[in-house]
Image (spheres, grey):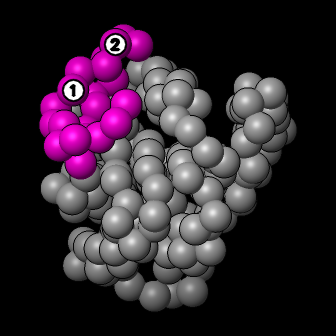
Amino acid sequence: MGKICLVIGGRRSGKSEHAQTMAEKMAGPRAFIATCPVLDQEMADRIRKHQEARKSAGWITIEEPLDLVGAVSGSSGYNVLLIDCLTLWINNLMYKSQRNQDSISEEIISGEAAKMIQACLRHPGEIILVTNETGLGIVPDNEQTRLFLDLMGRCNQIVSKEADKVVLMVCGQPLILKNRNFKI
């Protein structure tokens, strides 16, 4: 049964670096599940920088913007999975639904998040999930952004409820919100 750690924080809070440091302290082969699509040159540069930062530690990178259940289920040979990030995953699901003219709601995201968590719980190792805390700002002036923030909030609640450990990153400092016997 997999152990789950959620690392949450605002933009540039240090969450990805902290999650990677945690994962590199764990034994066994590691896989990085990346949810970020390349949208422009700046994003390509960011992705390359993150990949270089993992290269020397023997990471395998799995690019999967939508099917986290499949990515986690197909990664049972890795003792440690780092999924970065749920924020982009929700964004990608929202974009796909709009492009296909499908509806998306908190109920749909709740179901997707629950399926992803079940896959994580079936994984034999440790899984670290990274996400943004998006609920601390002002109420946006447009419907799409409000919907995105609602979807993120719902996803984060579902994941944190099932997580063995929850770390809130603030100014590069980890604040442990929950820890039920997670190794690192």
Q: Is residue 142 left or right of residue 15?
A: left
The magenta span reads 164-184
Q: Is residue 153 above or below residue 169?
A: below
The structure residue drawn at horizontal position 42% and vertical position 21%, both measured from the top left corner, is 13
The percent position of residue 30, horizontal first and vertical second, equals 64, 47
The structure residue drawn at horizontal position 16% and vertical position 32%, both measured from the top left corner, is 177
Q: Which residue is more in the foreground, 113 or 105?
A: 113
Within 10 Å of disc 1 (Cα), the crowding (few <14, some 14-19, many 20+) is: few
Tell me the amino acid under the disc marked 1. Answer: Ile
Q: Which residue is mark 1?
A: 176
Res. 162 image quadrant: bottom left
The structure residue drawn at horizontal position 23% and vertical position 21%, both measured from the top left corner, is 175
The percent position of residue 101, horizontal first and vertical second, equals 51, 87
Badge nearest the viewer, 2 or 1: 1
The percent position of residue 84, horizontal first and vertical second, equals 54, 46
Q: Which residue is mark 2?
A: 173
Res. 184 image quadrant: top left
Q: Which residue is more in the foreground, 116 or 144?
A: 116
Q: Is residue 172 above or below residue 132?
A: above
Mainly helix, strand or loop, the magenta region? strand
Tell me the amino acid under the disc marked 2. Answer: Gln
Within 10 Å of disc 2 (Cα), the crowding (few <14, some 14-19, many 20+) is: some
Res. 7 image quadrant: top left
Which label number is shown at residue 59? none
Quadrant (top left, top right, bottom left, bottom right) of the N terminus: bottom left
